[in-house]
Image (cartoon, coloured by chain):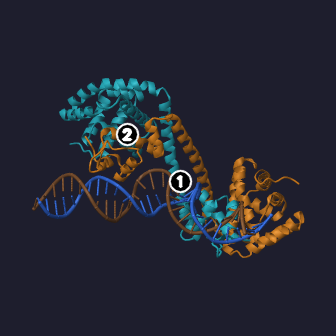
Chain colours: A cyan, B orange, C blue, D brown
DNA sequence: GGTAGAAGTTGACGTAACGAGAAGGTCCAG
DNA sequence: CTGGACCTTCTCGTTACGTCAACTTCTACC
């Protein structure tokens, strides 16, 4: 009752290559190896293979299966850890799928049309925003702005639009977090704010203080506020809190 | 406003190695490469990197990101396909997690205690089962049995117990499928029955006809029936249907 | 101008779990 | 004795980098 490698392959649905691999890594050794190198498997090996396949179906790594079948350590604890990993993975997947859904909806709607309006609106609001920032925080900010202008001035229209669309999508995700009841200083929101900060810094080399100051702009500057309210009327004050929380918690900002 | 590789790394949270990798595969080329080989990135590249990171977070493969950012083909359709893949993956994960939960519960309960009872019970029922099968299907089956005995007779007690536990877990999963309203000839159940058939064949080289015959044993043999009813009182007839469905649909059995 | 240290470069190998294919030995039937 | 089926052991490729190793370059300091 010995079986050749391809017999076992047919019975199990694996390929001979896979069985050789399992031999190589010590997961499933043949009952004996003949003088000509041929592998011969007995039923004991088939029984072991059955358990291997069961665990493999569950997504347990082969190395882990080797250990589990060797019977050392706490099987149940190992499976429980594996389960927890999978659950965490599943939750991440959920989050990703939600984000994808929003992104797809955003891209497939009339997004492309309104993109231009948004862009022109942004350009018009820009001078206004600059004067406001200078009045609030002095000319140090003006230098920042000049620097940012020097960069964005060389952007193509497409690059502008992409940046704008990216920003709007982020605001939508933040809006969803807000309406979902998340606090502006919760871990999930601060993680999202990382993207916000990175996005800002792309255009403007903001340090902790400058970013913190942006919170006032979001609620105080009419143009900015209107743009954000267009996405979510309740977002500006919540976003301001989130900006302050991020500056304090993640950038080490302290009021001076 | 040029940034060195490690500056970009710090700003983005990636490592220099990763950025070099992105250069290698053409995902993110530096704005220029100096005569000494140093990579220098401008803001245009940071903007691109931001979009890369967004898509990467969504689990989009790097090659796909390259294509998406190149703007060839239908972005939305690509993202939708990706989403569908993820949803399918999530469903598989759910299934796996459910199976893991059952397995863990099974292993961590008093499973180990009852294992022995089950084993001894199994051994006692074995002779009876054999006589029944011979009466029903003649001595061809007896040969099969002798062969199986020759194998299992050499098993260790531990191997017996493992096989028994494995079988019981499978019956539990089948029971859950049944109580969940799945039909014995549904695809999901037939997939589960693959495991059943493989398990049977491990002990007994059953062809399509022999496996089909097993359906009668499951309901007709008192010992077998009692064992299965212990797990789920309604399981025997449903299991018999599933066995017949599997023999017919997947093994090509035809009544002769 | 020499030197230490930080930061840059290009390989090369390792990861998980095999698939694909090359080059060659073995077995069995006609 | 020969063709075809089956077996073997390599080796490379896959994904997205981490981790050395060996070497060059830049920068600061004495």
Q: Residues within 10 Å of mark 1 (few under 14, many from 20)?
A: many
Residue A108 is left or right of residue A149, and the answer is right
User: Measuring 77% from the left and 73% from the top, which residue is drawn there?
Assistant: B149
Look at the image and tell me in which quarter the N terminus of chain A lies. bottom right
Judge whether A244 appears above or below B171 on screen: above
Going 48% across and 46% down the picture, which residue do you hit? Answer: B61
- Image quadrant for the C terminus of chain A? top left
Residue A38 position, x and y percent, is 65, 71
Residue C2 location (% of width, % of height): 14, 63
**Please, what secondary structure does the residue beneath circle 1 have?**
helix
Q: In the picture, residue A144 is in which quadrant?
A: top left
Indicate which disc residue B48 carries: 2
Residue B187 against residue A10 in the figure, above or below: above
Depth check: B172 or B250 in front? B250
Q: Is residue A134 above or below residue B190?
A: above
- Residue behind mark 1: A86
Q: Is residue B198 left or right of residue A61?
A: right
**Residue depicted at x 75% and y 50%:** B184
Q: Position of residue B168 (x, y in %)?
A: 70, 62
**Chain of residue at mark 2:** B
């Amino acid at each position: 009752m010995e079986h050749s490698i391809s017999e076992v392959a047919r019975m199990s649905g694996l390929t001979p290559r896979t069985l050789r691999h399992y031999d190589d890594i010590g997961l499933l050794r043949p009952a004996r190896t003949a003088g000509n190198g041929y592998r011969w498997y007995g039923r004991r090996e088939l029984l072991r293979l059955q358990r291997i396949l069961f665990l493999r179906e569950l997504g347990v790594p082969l190395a882990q299966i080797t250990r589990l079948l060797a019977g050392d350590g706490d099987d149940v604890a190992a499976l429980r850890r594996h389960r927890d990993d999978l659950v965490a993975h599943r939750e991440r997947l959920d989050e990703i799928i939600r984000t994808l859904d929003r992104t797809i909806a955003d891209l497939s709607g009339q997004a492309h049309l309104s993109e231009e309006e948004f862009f022109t609106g942004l350009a018009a609001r820009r001078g206004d925003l600059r004067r406001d920032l200078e009045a609030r925080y002095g000319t140090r900010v003006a230098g920042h702005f000049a620097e940012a202008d020097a960069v964005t001035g060389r952007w193509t229209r497409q690059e502008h639009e992409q940046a704008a669309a990216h920003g709007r999508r982020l605001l939508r995700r933040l809006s969803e977090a807000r309406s979902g009841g998340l606090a502006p200083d919760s871990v999930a929101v601060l993680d999202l704010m990382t993207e916000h900060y990175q996005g800002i810094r792309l255009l403007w080399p903001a340090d902790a203080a400058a970013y913190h100051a942006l919170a006032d702009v979001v609620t105080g500057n009419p143009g900015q506020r209107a743009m954000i309210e267009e996405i979510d009327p309740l977002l500006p004050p919540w976003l301001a809190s989130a900006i302050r929380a991020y500056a304090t918690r993640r950038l080490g900002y302290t009021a001076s």
